[in-house]
Amino acid sequence: MGDQLDLFPQPQQNKISRIIKRDGRLVAFNKLKIINAIYRAAASLGGQDRDRSAFLTDQVVKRINESYPPGATPSVEDIQDFVEKVLIDNGHAKTAKAFILYRYEKTKTRDQKPEVSGVQDNIPYKVLWRVLSWNVDHGCHTVEGMNKAVTDGGWKKLIREAERAYHEEVHHVAGVIVKRLPDLRLVIVAGPSSSGKTTTTTKISERLSARGHRFLLMNLDNYFKDLSRQPKDEYGDYDFEMPAALDLDLINEHLGLLLEGKPIRMPIYNFKTGVREKETQEFRLKEKEILLIDSLHGLYDGMTKSIAPENTFRFYIEALCQIKDNDGEFVRWADLRLMRRMVRDSWHRSYDPAMTVGHWHYVRKSELRYIVPYIQSVDYIFNGSLPYELPYHKARLLPLLPDIVERFKRDPKKVDAFLRAQRLERLLSSVAAGAPEEDVPADSLFREFIGGSQYHY
């Protein structure tokens, strides 16, 4: 099951404490990920018995212990071979086949990826290296190092230096935009959910204004289609994460008119009722004004097909978290953004964090389909993560996660949600507590998610 068998520490009776990954790294062994792998394969065929998955995993561990002497270090492939044999020997040939097919597809996908460590979602390696290098220099490239800053009195300094680095990059981006004037008319701030688009767009606007350049912020949320026109899935959930949720034809029409200096009547979308209001508001781009928009799908071709490339600056932001957990694995960017959204949804939209976790498969699916393929076409890639976030997420989310894990644990249709919640619970359990929230500045990007910002969202 590829990286899904990166296993956690186990009771002492197991002879095997570590396994070898395909890239040669040693990681801790734990049967929990084997349970998840078997359950996921069974769920793909309609299976719903998680207890059976746990029983079969015990058989796998038993065979491993019988086959290896104490202290031995099997490979991921060795573990997977045992899983296949146990499934077949226990009469689960179909589940074994699903497991084998999934394993094959993961291998094929892995073989097609460039062999450059750390490259994810089409982000250039040099961008990731810059972020990682900063974290290493400041001792926060691991959860252990971050915890030390919390407990040893270096927390305020870390926040101060992280905020300075973020604002320096915002200043740099504004300068890049100014250099492309007067041809540049449209700046697009794009990126996945909870990457920090809104705050960063606001801050870029502030920098442009300080340099004497007029700007106009256009909110594309007003272009959502009425709820009655949004598709639902088998659970009755709406998928707002796809470009088709927006009225792309109207967006293109209005962008074209604005860049010609003509006024438009912008719709007003009511998120409480799920429909556009009858009233509209006049919107006009004056001469020498720069149109600024932030959108989840700003890189999608259909979003700006009517605009000439030379008139557009494409700015991409992602939470490029370069922090390793206690197992030596980088914290997933999508997991950091999920935690941000869980926190924000709970206080800003009165949305149950469990529902945010359950809906997240839409978010990630849309990102991989409509955002990631276009990243290489952008003019600038910006890091929207802050290296001090995890203790604050721990304080808000860790008390909730056991119930969320239990909620999705035995639902075969929500395996992804269960695995995400389980992964977050393990990560946050290893993070130090006690970071004072008052240390986070009111103008911080992070305030967009935890509240208390000087900006109004």
Image (spheres, rainbow, N blue to C red):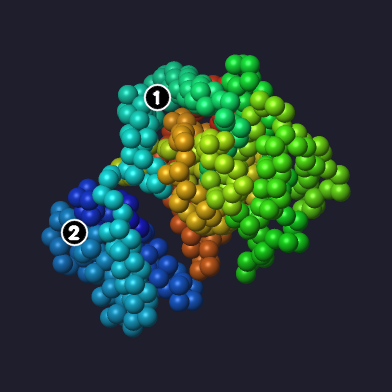
Q: Give the secondary structure at mark 2.
A: loop
Determine crowd level at label 2: few under 14, some 14-19, many 20+ residues with C-alpha closer than 10 A: some
Looking at the image, can residue 418 be seen?
A: no
Is 319 situated left or right of 303 in this image? left
Q: Is residue 55 above or below residue 451?
A: below
As drawn, the label of residue 149 is 1
Q: Residue at x 56, y 25 (%)?
A: 181
Which quadrant, please, contains the C terminus? Answer: top right
Q: Which corner quadrant of the image does residue 107 belong to?
A: bottom left
Q: Earlier in the sequence, mark 1 or mark 2?
A: 2
Residue 243 x, y percent position in the rendering: 61, 54
User: Residue type at mark 2?
Assistant: Pro
Q: Nearer the viewer, residue 429 or 79?
A: 79
Q: Residue at x 45, y 77 (%)?
A: 45
Q: Measure the alpha-carbon separation of dots 1 and 2.
A: 36 Å
Looking at the image, can residue 41 be seen?
A: yes
Q: Nearer the viewer, residue 97 or 381?
A: 381
Q: Nearer the viewer, residue 237 or 403?
A: 237
As drawn, the label of residue 74 is 2
Residue 180 x, y percent position in the rendering: 52, 27
Is 451 situated left or right of 130 in this image? right
In the image as oriented, which residue stretches furthest toward the right? 278
Q: Is residue 310 above or below residue 155?
A: below
Q: Mark 1 and mark 2 in contact? Answer it, CB < 8 Å.
A: no
As drawn, the label of residue 186 is none
Determine crowd level at label 1: few under 14, some 14-19, many 20+ residues with C-alpha closer than 10 A: many
Q: Give the secondary structure at mark 1.
A: helix
In the image as oriented, which residue stretches furthest toward the left? 69
Is 79 situated left or right of 398 in this image? left
Q: Residue at x 53, y 68 (%)?
A: 413
Q: Which corner quadrant of the image does residue 281 belong to?
A: top right
User: Residue type at mark 1?
Assistant: Ala
